[in-house]
């Protein structure tokens, strides 16, 4: 009788240990998936933002400017439609946070839209309207929104660096109606609640993108 009780106790301990081990493996797998997903998103953004094109457009106030608009909480720019920088097709991109009333439904979103160099740009409606095309032009690429990461109460912040000849580097929270691209774009993405859950968003706090248009300048000024 005692032997049976001891055997049952040992089996209970073994099964309990296996359940704990399985949960540990599941947690490790989930953590690895988060690491992999965030790394993939970072690499995607690095390629796209690094390929921002120095295209010229006019806004509805007839102001000639670079096709790049940087705000504290979102970024709009033009880059190739594919990862290869040699692509001739260009798209508008907008990186932003899409908020939701549901705590786990807020996301880092990348919007895309066809780019037309002759189009008069209304920045407030840029991603709400399709570009006008002539009768002999091919249909533009449709607007698409890509959910890159699901977040919880995130804070998205951008900063923009530029160096004028003979001056020190300047960092600004916005880049609006400028005639040239910034030298570097810094992206800070974090969530206080995510840190409590042990997620990895704090790794984004110092994520920087050097625009290829200024690759040589980045090396010479040491940033």
Image (tube, rainbow, N blue to C red):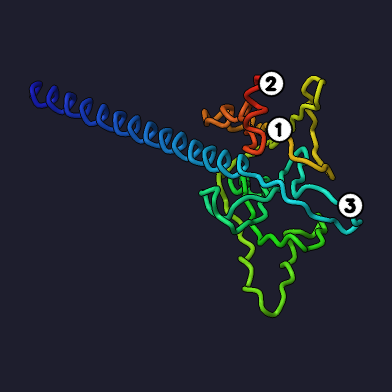
- On-image quarter of the N terminus: top left
Helix, strand or loop at mark 1: loop
Q: Count the marks: how many?
A: 3
Give yes or no for contact between labels 1 and 2 (Cβ–Cβ under 8 Å): yes
Residue 1 falls left or right of residue 217: left
Which x, y percent locates residue 189? 64, 34
Q: Give the answer, above or below, for where 204 lies relative to 78.
A: above
Helix, strand or loop at mark 3: loop
Give yes or no for contact between labels 3 and 1 (Cβ–Cβ under 8 Å): no
- For the residues carrying marks 2 and 3, which lies nearer the camera in this image? 2
Q: Give the answer, above or below, for where 118 lies relative to 195.
A: below
Residue 183 is marked as 1
Query: What is the spatial separation of the Cα atoms under label 2 and label 3, in whole angstroms?
Result: 30 Å
Query: What is the spatial separation of the Cα atoms under label 3 and label 1, in whole angstroms?
Result: 22 Å
- The residue where tag 3 is placed is 63
- The residue where tag 2 is placed is 221
Helix, strand or loop at mark 2: helix
Tell me what residue is drawn at x 62 percent, y 45 percent.
Answer: 108
The furthest residue to the bottom: 135
Residue 137 is marked as none
Nearer-N-terminus badge (2/3):
3
Give yes or no for contact between labels 2 and 3 (Cβ–Cβ under 8 Å): no
């Amino acid at each position: 009788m005692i032997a049976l009780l001891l055997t049952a106790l040992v089996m209970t301990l073994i099964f309990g240990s296996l359940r704990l081990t399985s949960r540990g493996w599941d947690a490790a797998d989930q953590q690895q998936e988060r690491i992999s997903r965030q790394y993939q998103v970072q690499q995607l953004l690095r390629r796209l933002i690094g390929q921002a094109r120095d295209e010229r457009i006019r806004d509805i106030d007839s102001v000639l400017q670079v096709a790049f608009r940087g705000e504290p909480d979102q970024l709009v720019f033009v880059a190739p439609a594919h990862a290869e920088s040699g692509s001739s097709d260009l798209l508008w991109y907008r990186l932003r946070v899409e908020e939701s009333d549901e705590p786990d439904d807020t996301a880092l979103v990348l919007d895309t839209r066809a780019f037309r160099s002759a189009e008069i740009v209304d920045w407030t409606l840029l991603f709400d309207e399709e570009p006008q095309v002539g009768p002999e032009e091919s249909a533009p690429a449709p607007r698409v929104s890509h959910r890159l990461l699901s977040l919880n109460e995130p804070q998205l912040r951008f900063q923009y660096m530029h160096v004028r000849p003979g001056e020190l580097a300047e960092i600004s929270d916005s880049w609006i109606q400028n005639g040239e691209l910034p030298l570097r774009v810094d992206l800070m993405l974090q969530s206080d609640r995510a840190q409590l859950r042990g997620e990895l968003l704090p790794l984004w706090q110092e994520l920087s993108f050097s625009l290829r248009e200024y690759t040589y300048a980045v090396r010479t000024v040491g940033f």
